Image (cartoon, coloured by chain):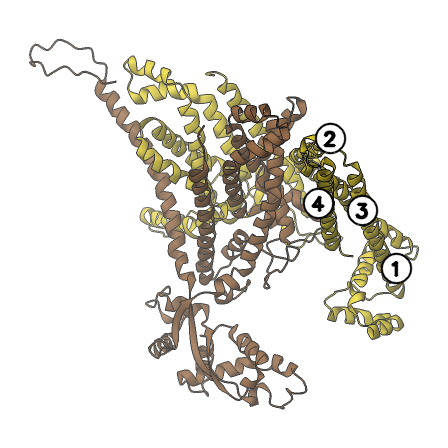
Chain colours: A yellow, B brown
Amino acid sequence: MSTSLILVCLLFAGAGAYALASSRALSLAGGRLSSLHSRPGYYGAYAAIAAMLPAVLVLAVWLAASPAVIESSVRGGFPQGGQAQSENLNYGMVSAIARGLPLLSAEDVAEVSANPAALRGKLALKGVALAGDPAPWMIESARTLNAKTGTSRLWMSLAVLALALAGAVYGLRAVAPRFRARNSVERVILWSLVAASSIAILTTIGIVLSMLTEAAHFFRSVPAWEFFFGTVWDPRFAGAGSASAGQFGLIPLLAGTLYIGFVAMLVAVPVGLFAAIYMAEYASPRIRSIAKPLLEVLAGIPTIVYGFFALATVGPFLRDISAEISGLATGNYTSFIQAQSVLTAGIVMGIMLIPYVSSLSDDIITAVPRALRDGSLGLGATQSETIKKVVLPAALPGIVGALLMTASRAIGETMIVVLAAGVAARMQLNPFEPMTTVTVKIVNQLTGDLEFTSPQTLVAFALGITLFAITLCLNIYALYIVRKYREQYE
Amino acid sequence: MTVVSPTAAPVSKAPARRDIGIKRRYAAERRFRAYGIAALAFGIVFLFLLLSTVFRNGYTAFQQTAITLPVTFSEQLIDPGGKRASDPSVLVSANYAAVLRDGIVAKLGVDPQSRADVRAANAMLSKGAPIQLRDMVVANPALIGQTVNVTVLADAQIDSANKGQIDLTVPESSRKVSDKQVGWMQQLTEAGAMSKQFNTGLFTSGNSSRPEAAGLGVALAGSLYLMLIVLALSLPIGVAASIYLEEFAPKNRLTDLIEVNINNLAAVPSIVYGLLGLAVFINFAGLPRSASLVGGLVLTLMTLPTIIIATRAALRAVPPSIRAAALGLGASKMQMVFHHVLPLAMPGILTGTIIGLAHALGETAPLLLIGMVAFVVDIPGTPMEPSTALPVQIYMWANEAERAFVERTSGAIIVLLLFLIVMNLGAILLRRRFERRW
């Protein structure tokens, strides 16, 4: 029985249990519903839960555990003396053969049993590729594997369905006027709510653990201090068995990340802040109601669109205009800004960040109490003086928090820099040249063919955990500042 | 803050006024205000610049040049041995390129002996056109021996030239379309054989290395799967988590931790979720690479914090009197939440969900890491098959060098932005229509 068929059966069992239990509760009440502790639907729901929940749990555990159990028992039947590496390869072949065997016709199977060498070609015709020519024992192992999978599936179906039946009977027998069905059902619901909210924690644990374990693999082949303090990024290609691992220095990537982020903040902070000040303090409600959504549209545009805009429009524009400028100045029309450069990526990323700065600061500026402004204006200060001397200092902690959050977004931004910043890991100060960032290198190292043992791939996780740590610190600090500030006027 | 300025007194007897720099201060005031306007204008101008650039480059992608030719499916070329009755594979491997070439040569009246001319004429048609002929013949072998009018796609260069994107004043040697081909294009257009038609292939075909045949079909299907998975998982989980945190959770260390966690998860760079998906779902759980199932799971984890934050705000906006009334009438706490609070909070929850989905739809970086950046030609039938997504397709096309791919990329961006606009408008309408102020 396929898993989906079992699930459909379970659904039917649950629905049946629900209908039976609620009608039984009704008949027990004998027309006086008030004699029941809970409304009939709750008895039905109790029976349905009893029928489905244990069965589903067993199904999930069985599905998760059985492949590993079967694998180890099939591996036990492998000929002795192989290395762990080749055993893995062999098991891959065996499972591929096991997938392919049921696709072959009866004559083919008979022919293959006599002549194993023919198997590869026949399976290739059916769309199952083998890594090499199979040995005769592999076909035997594949047969065992298929047989064991079949047996496991049969027992699983039987066990799950029997459990569902038993649960339904148990739920039905529990129906009685004094039985507190509602409380039991609500307890199950409450636990499912708890489970749902624990997913947030599980995600964080998953992020930290998965990246730490993979990064630990990486640090086994490359020492941690060479990674964190290395100044050369030259990972080479992942060659099979090549001893030279290349150099994995984080510093050039970090320098590029911070430089591009700095340029982006140079664009985003003044523009975003002034836009926020204008909208909060000067603009009429009508202008505000038009301008604020328009700026927020900028935040809704996917970053890949910004990346393409930088790549196809801003980069070439800067390159051409720099050629014009140098032509006018020296007569030599060569561009000094490259199409992919720190400047291109920084400007476009800055535009992307404007709405973050402006809407966060807007909220903070409007939260400054009216009384502070009135006091300052009453003393004869102009509006801009009030803003500069009173409102902004009062809002400063909140604004700093907002800027930190924006900076963390700039550091974690990927698509704009992938398309517009270039891939050359260099340490230099010229904003007209390309530099690269942590996120670009994560993408570079992980697209293409992957081999999860080479440091070239695993370095992405070390980069990832660095990125995660930096943004986490920035965000926690920002949250701390913002929270501390909020208490002042409440 | 009106400053009363003294009426102009006689110049001679004006009392010496202390100079408090009113002029200077007012100039500073005007400057400050101008900076604000300039900043606002800068942002809005860039918004329109971005949108207009994309639109200008992209609107032509919705049209495609096609050429209608009388093609003779000659038996000599397709099945010289007459073996198609016994061996149908003859029809698959036949030389349809030659069939097509004869068609265009005859249509344009090119001298069949001049190899250069024949090649130039043939280059006007898409390299995918012979496959189209093959599919026609395989589906209907009775075509052999007949002459049929067939509409095939023009080559991407011809398409660009027909849309006026190639500067014909440039010397012939440095552009991709020769003068002869331009002449033929005029000839075909005058004969009504070459026309621009709506580009249905953009929405139905899979990826291709030939710009004229590349389409968003796979990406649209993949994005659809992604959105369905994200919706099916993140809405129930997000709502359940918010209900627990907002209505049931005791105030203790653990719930505090969960709260801080959710706020931080909302700010984690999206690429980190891609690393998580790669390590956990693909490496550890053994799910297939490039499948939209994994993409959906990753985007679900990424969207959950957004949905939880929006849902909690919506739940908090339901006044306590509703809760008190329900409890007072004897409802259990669970009944109070599910029968009264949740329905009232639903518009806010759905608005937050749509915005979260729109965010997930435009997300690219995590999908790159789990291998959805694959060259997929066939539209995936299930979420387990390799697929791409709209933003990933944009990324892949953005990396192609050919001019025609710029047009396709911009067209794909327009499609993506249209989806986002529709979703956000839906969210706004939902809020306007159902939101209650208490």
The answer to whether residue A338 is visible is: no
Horizontal and vertical percent position of residue A244: 72, 48
Alpha-carbon span between mark 2 and mark 4: 18 Å
Dot 2 or dot 4, earlier in sequence = 4
Residues beneath discs 1 and 3 located on the same chain: yes
* Callout 2–callout 1 Cβ contact below 8 Å: no
CA distance separating discs 3 and 4: 14 Å
Q: Earlier in the sequence, mark 3 or mark 2?
A: 3
Q: Where residue A180 is drawn, which disc sits there?
A: 2
Mark 1 or mark 3: which comes first in sequence?
1
Q: What whole-number distance in Å separates the C-alpha atoms at marks 1 and 3?
A: 31 Å
> Which corner quadrant of the image does residue A151 belong to?
bottom right
- The label nearer to you, 1 versus 3, is 3
Q: CA distance from mark 2 to mark 1?
A: 50 Å
Q: Report the amino acid beneath label 4.
A: Ala
Q: Are marks 1 and 4 in contact (CB under 8 Å)?
A: no
Which chain is indicated by disc 4?
A: A
Mark 1 element type:
helix
Numbered disc 3: secondary structure: helix
Residue at the spot of label 4: A19
Q: What is the three-letter code of the residue carrying label 3?
A: Leu
**Residue drawn where x is 40% and y is 22% of the image:** A392
Kindly identify which residue carries mark 3.
Answer: A165
Q: Give the secondary structure at mark 4.
A: helix
Mark positioned earlier in the residue sequence (3 or 4): 4
Chain at numbered mark 1:
A
